[in-house]
Image (spheres, grey):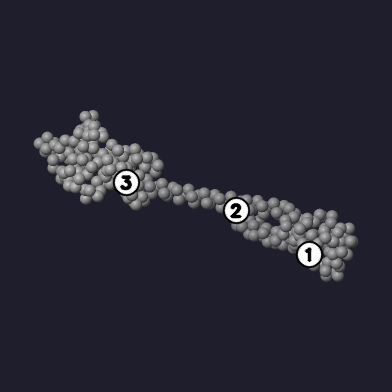
Amino acid sequence: MEPSELTNIGSKIRKVRRSKGLSQSELSKNLGISASYLNLLESGRRKITVPLLIKIGNELGISLKDLTLESNKRILSDVMEVLSNELFEDLDITNHETTEFISSNPNIAKAMLTLNDSYKSLREDMQNRLEVMEVESSIKERKSTRLPVEIVSDFLQENKNYFDNIERKAESIRNKIYFEEGHRTIGHSLIQYLLNEHNTKTKVVSTEEDEKSIKKFDENNKILFLSEMLTYSARNFHLAYQIAYFDAHEIINRIIEDNKIYSEEVISLLKISLLNYFAAALLMPYDV
């Protein structure tokens, strides 16, 4: 029996005992048990065996059915709730049939309630799983329809357009380069850094030599070509971008890996954005 059932039966015994004017000592003596044990039975803190329950019924002049009626009421209510499900509409089960079934088969009724609880739990779990799958599918679908440029833009916004490790790397390189005021001297410092640190020469080309390209990097010969049409400020930015290409690629690759970005198109655009970010961080506040 469940603890709540024991309490109901125990309180029923106490109620009938008192109505007949019997003390715990008197009834316990007739039952052949101690008064303290009877007190535990009446308070629902000890299990009541069927032989003792029959004996108590005989002493108090009540049937076993009367003693267990209260505990069966809760089971009846629960079973009625289960049978009200539309699954059982065609069976036309009456309240009388249900009451008789519980009275004669209380353990089977409890088993049915346990099975129903398991079914409800399984159904709720499946519903939760389906909802999670639907949400994940919606997110994936939404992500798959976004353009690479939108994904990069969202990524930059999510990080509030600030990357501390890039900032610190740019600052460490800036400390190596001696910047003097003026666009010309800044450009000269950047050119010297590329030559000294990365063995890369910088060459300014005229429109006669190359009228199409503003910037071109010859990786095999380590030469950076910049158009003479560029302003000093724009030229300095391209120089800083080239430094970023050499010095920031490991940090940028780590950011991409840590954020689990796999699309080649997104990676390409994001690398350009972060290289630009590094170049700006390197020049600030000197070249504004």
Q: Which residue is mark 1?
A: 12
Residue type pointed to by label 1: Lys
Q: Residue at x 86, y 70 (%)?
A: 21
Query: Element type at marker 2?
Result: helix
- Mark 1 or mark 2: whose residue is earlier in sequence: 1
Q: Which residue is mark 3?
A: 167
Q: Which residue is mark 2?
A: 120
Q: Is residue 276 left or right of residue 52?
A: left
Does residue 5 appear anywhere in the picture? yes
Q: Is residue 211 left or right of residue 277?
A: left
- Mark 2 or mark 3: whose residue is earlier in sequence: 2
Q: Residue at x 84, y 55 (%)?
A: 51
Number of other residues with Cα within 10 Å of mark 2, as a class: few under 14, some 14 to 19, many 20 or more: few
Q: Is residue 48 left or right of residue 131?
A: right
Residue type pointed to by label 2: Lys
Q: How many marks?
A: 3
Distance of label 1 from label 3 (alpha carbons)? 78 Å
- Mark 1 or mark 3: whose residue is earlier in sequence: 1
